[in-house]
Image: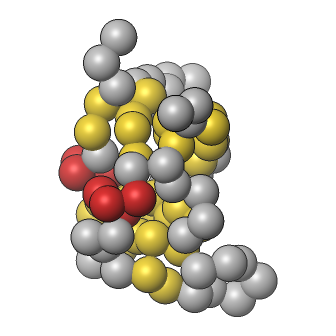
Amino acid sequence: MKLTKEEIRVPIWNNGERAIGLATHKPPCLLEITYINSKKERLYPDTYIVTKEFAAKYPVKKFTKTPPLFIIPIVDLIKEES
C-alpha cells in the first residue's frame, strides 16, 4: 500500500499539549510537521506514520472552515522507521 505524504505547517495546542489536526479522510499517510521556530529550527524533524486504526483512537473536532479533524498529541505519533 502506497502512503500519501501529508504536511502539517503549524501544530495546535490541545489541553496544554502540542497536537496536530489531521483531516479524517487523510489516514493512512506519512506525516511531516514542518513548523520552524524563531531560531529557524525545525522542532519536529521526523516523519510519522498515521494509520486509520491509530487515528481512530483520538477525538474528532470540527472547527470553522475545516473538515473534521483527528486531534492527535505529537508525543503519541509513531516515527517512521528508515
Counting from the top left corner in percent of width and height, residue 33 is at 52, 39
Report x, y in % for residue 79. 30, 30
How many labels, in total? Answer: 0
- Residue 75: x %, y % from top left: 23, 48
Task: Name the side, left or right, on which 40 lies relative to 44.
Answer: right
**Residue at (22% x, 51% y) in the render:** 76
Residue 48: in sight, yes or no? yes
The residue furthest top is 82
Quarter of image, res 36: top right
Residue pictured at 35% horizontal, 80% vertical: 59
Colour scheme employed for the rendering of this structure = secondary structure
In the rendered image of this protein, does residue 62 appear above or below residue 37?
below
Residue toward you, 1 or 21: 1
| Residue at the (71%, 78%) spot, across then down | 66
Q: Seen in the image, is 4 located left or right of residue 1?
A: right
Residue 61 drawn at (x, y percent): 49, 85
Q: Nearer the viewer, residue 55 or 39?
A: 55
Which quadrant: the C terminus? top left
**Quadrant of the rendered structure where residue 34 is?**
top right
70 lies above or below 79: below
Q: Is residue 65 above or below residue 44?
A: below
In front of the other: 48 or 53: 53
Residue 32 shows up from this direction: no
Left or right: 65, with 52 as reference point: right
The image quarter containing residue 23 is bottom right
Outermost residue on the front side: it is 1
- Residue at the outermost right position: 65
User: Who's the residue at 34% across and 26% down the image?
Assistant: 80
Q: Nearer the viewer, residue 77 or 9?
A: 77
